[in-house]
Structures are given as C-alpha cells and as structure tokens.
Image: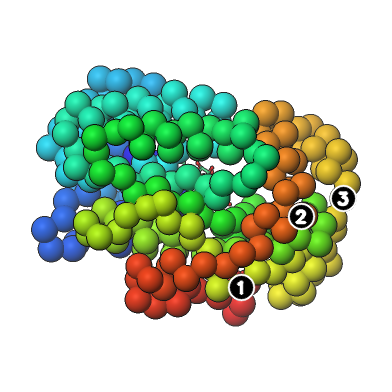
Amino acid sequence: MIGATGELGRQVAGSLIGRDGVTVRAFVRRPPPDGEGSFPDVLVGDLRDRASLERACSGVTSMFLVSSPTRDQVELETNAIEAAERAAVERIVKVSNIPVAGLESGLHGNHRAIERRLDESECATTVLQPSFFASVVDKQREQVARGRLVLPTGPGKIAWIDPFDIAAVAAAALVRSDVNGPLHLTGPEALDGDEVAARLGVRRVDPPLDRWREAVVAAGLDPWLADSTVHLYEAVARGALAGTTDTVERVLGRSPRRVFVG
Ligand SMILES: NC(=O)c1ccc[n+]([C@@H]2O[C@H](COP(=O)([O-])OP(=O)(O)OC[C@H]3O[C@@H](n4cnc5c(N)ncnc54)[C@H](OP(=O)(O)O)[C@@H]3O)[C@@H](O)[C@H]2O)c1
C-alpha cells in the first residue's frame, strides 16, 4: 500500500488487515513510532526512490496507489506503476479525481496523465475518481469552532463523499477482480456551501477567489496547488461536481454514507 499513512490509506489498511488470505504491506516514508500504526509488514521507502519501490512490490498481488497532490505527482506515481509492472503486480488501484471539462493542467492534468499511463499498463487497473472528501472541512476545525466555514464555491453544489466509502471501495477493488474502473464515486446528495454550513451550525463565508488565493498562499499553500484549486472552485461554482452516482452502492451493496450529519 502506497500512502498507507494518509487519510485513505489508513482506512483501507484498517479494513483489510485481519481478513483471511490478505497480507497488507505498508510503504511508508518514516517507520511508525512503536505501538502506532500497527501495520503487520512495513517497508520504509519513498516514491522518489525506485529501489525502495522494487523491494516493496516483490511478491505483491495488488497495489493501492495514493499520494499527495503535488507538482511532481505524475513522476512519483509513474515510479510506482513501473515498479508494479516489473514485479508483475496483477492490479493497481489508484486514487484519482473526477475529470472536469476544461481542467487539463495542474492537479487535474496530473491525474489525467497518470490515468493515461495506467491505460497503457499491462497491470489490471481500477481508477477511483472521488468527489470532494467531506473531511476537507475538518481542516477548518478551528474556524468552525469559531462559527464560520470558508467555502469559496459560490452557488455550486458538491456531491461530497465520506472518505470511509472511498476506502471501502478501494479495499474491495484490491481483493476482488470484478471492481474495475474508472469509478466515479460520490456521496448520496449534493450540497452547496450554505447547506454544508447550515448542517454544521455555522456561518458560511464565500470570499472572492483572488482574495482566497492570496490568503492561502500567505498561509503556506504551494501557489501551484492554490491555482489548481481556484480553477476547480470556479468549475464547482458552475456545477461541475454536483452530480451523484450509484457507484458506491453498486460496488458495496449499501448506500454511501450521508455527510455532515450527527
Ligand atoms: N481531498 C479531496 O477532496 C480529494 C478529492 C479527490 C481526489 N483527491 C486526491 O486524493 C489524493 C490524496 O490526497 P490527500 O492530500 O488527502 O493525501 P494524504 O491523506 O495526505 O495521503 C498522502 C499519502 O501519500 C504519501 N506520500 C506522499 N508523498 C510520498 C512520497 N514521496 N513517498 C511515499 N509516500 C508519499 C503520504 O505519506 P506521508 O505520511 O509520509 O506524508 C501519505 O501517506 C490526492 O491525489 C488528491 O488529488 C482528493
């Protein structure tokens, strides 16, 4: 599992560890502190270090592939795909995002380039294309505690998804051969920023995108990611992520979780 320490990776591992016939190998940059993480098999490496990826792929049947949204994501994930191919890994399950017309560069361009690379691969692949994670709101925990939520997405609705459901679909794809992609994953309903804020019982703030970009870059966000996010938020405002799908239900046999409730 690449990205085993991340939000999705931890949940995918949690749902697979202990299943009959499944051994989870976690590929991590830093070994977990004693007593934490409890991965049965840990390999310390880096997506930049091809030799560590080769060691990680030895004897592996399925690879879970998620990494951070960075400028060099294509290069890093291609290293993992090449290592999987050399080790004859049977299936790669990659976390991507929902294609949006007009977003061909930046973060979206990177995911599309990795998907094209996977299309050429001899490994079977399952590409997961999730909508916005409902957990992105947790990153504003302090603001929410002060009664406000910043969502510069205008009137656009988003079919927010609980990361638990993405992880459950990923786990299914890793152990089943009938979960093929691309899988457009959403939650059960689309909510705009006002509706999310109302469910959380806070006031929604919808600043102009140029002011939002200035603030997040000043707070340390990579300008490249800030620009990608601005373009995405513009598309969201036009309704690009408002559609829901029944994919989670088709794969898991249950409805996706409702978000921002209880
Ligand atoms: N958030 C959303 O709403 C959303 C929606 C759709 C798609 N996505 C996609 O979901 C993916 C995950 O995003 P996230 O920010 O939520 O990720 P995350 O939870 O921070 O997980 C990223 C994982 O990748 C690992 N990683 C990063 N660089 C690595 C490297 N060089 N070598 C080895 N491991 C490395 C991290 O390890 P460390 O613990 O060592 O850092 C971490 O385990 C992104 O590709 C994003 O585009 C997100």
Q: At 71% from the left edge and 29% from the top edge, which residue is drawn?
A: 223
Which residue does the image show at 36% across and 36% down from the upper left? 118
Amino acid, disc 2:
Arg
Foreground residue among 53 and 33: 53
| Residue located at (38% from left, 71% from top) | 250
Asked if disc 1 is less than 8 Å from ligand 1, the answer is no
- Label 3 sits on a secondary structure element that is loop
Of marks 2 and 3, the one in the foreground: 2
Seen from the viewer's position, the closer of residues 248 and 198 is 248
Q: Give the foreground label among 3 and 1.
A: 1
Counting residues from the start of the chain, the first of labels 1 and 2 encountered is: 1
Q: Is residue 202 left or right of residue 245?
A: right
- The residue pinned by badge 2 equals 238
C-alpha gap between disc 1 and disc 2: 17 Å
Q: Residues within 10 Å of mark 2 (few under 14, many from 20)?
A: some
73 left or right of 224 in image: left
Q: Position of residue 77 (x, y in %)?
A: 40, 31
